[in-house]
Structures are given as C-alpha cells and as structure tokens.
Amino acid sequence: MSVNKATIIGRLAQDPELKYTQNGNAVVNFTLVTNERYKTKQGDMKEEAQFHKCFAWGKTAELIGEYLSKGRETYIEGKIKNRSYEKDDIKRYVTEIEVQQVQFLGGKGDNNKTDDVPF
C-alpha cells in the first residue's frame, strides 16, 4: 500500500497565474508559503519560510485564479508530483503539489472568516 497526499495551510506568495491550454483546459500555478518557528540551542527564536509550488486543473484552477491573491491564507490537499525539464542544456528537477481540494481561509480583510466559494 502507498499514499501520496500533501496537506498544507499557508499564504500565497504572489497572485496565482491562470492560463488555458490549447484545448481550453484551465491550469493555475501558485506558491504557498508556510512558516516554522523554533528555538535554537542558544535560546533564540528563529522563523523559517518554506515555499511550496502548487498547480491545479479545471474548475478548481479557475476558482483559485478568481478568488485567491497574494497573502491570502489557504488550505490545500493534493498529490506530490516530481518532474524534470532541460534549460540551457542542464536537467532541472521540480517538486510540486497537484491540488485536488482547496479551502479559502480568511476573508480579504479578515483572516478569521471563511469565504463561501461555489465548489
């Protein structure tokens, strides 16, 4: 048995980038940022940011493109995907999350409200 599932709550690092394929399928790319706070051995508090590349297809992509913007808190569930590509004759590797479920957290001006989004 195997499971490939990612669950993240974070904030958008920038506005989502919504595009359409030649076949008319919607795809959106965005980055979620999570912060981890911890205490060092010296007793100092540190904070580290992790950036998670994400993408979604179809109606989910269109809703993300319409309702989300930079700084918005969001909950996502999806699958971890790895891919490679070549740029300048160098093979590069990318790990991304294919979003299957999304919940928009906090309103545009209020981080404690949940928006009603038509899913």
Image (cartoon, grey):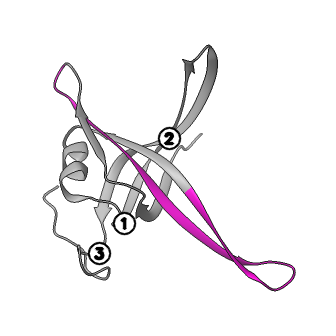
Question: Residue 16's x, y, as percent?
Answer: 31, 49
**Res. 102 image quadrant:** bottom left
Q: Which residue is mark 3?
A: 106
Report how far apart the C-alphas of labels 1 and 2 lie in the structure: 19 Å
Name the spot of residue 42 as percent of width and height, x first: 86, 82
Q: Which residue is mark 1?
A: 71
Q: Residue at x 50, y 40 (%)?
A: 96
In the image, residue 64 lies at what x, y percent?
25, 52
Q: Earlier in the sequence, mark 3 or mark 1?
A: 1
Residues packed near mark 2 inside 10 Å, few (<14), some (14 to 19) or many (20 plus): some
Instruction: Tell me which label, 2 or 3, sits earlier in the chain.
Output: 2
| Overall secondary structure of the magenta section | strand
Q: Mark 2 highlights which residue?
A: 96
Foreground residue among 63 and 7: 63
Segment colored magenta: 23-50
Eye-nearest disc, 3 or 1: 1
Q: Position of residue 63 (x, y in %)?
A: 19, 51
Instruction: State the residue at coordinates (52%, 64%).
Output: 34
Badge 1: few (under 14), some or many (20 or more) residues near its Cα, within 10 Å? some
Residue at 61% x, 26% y: name it: 92
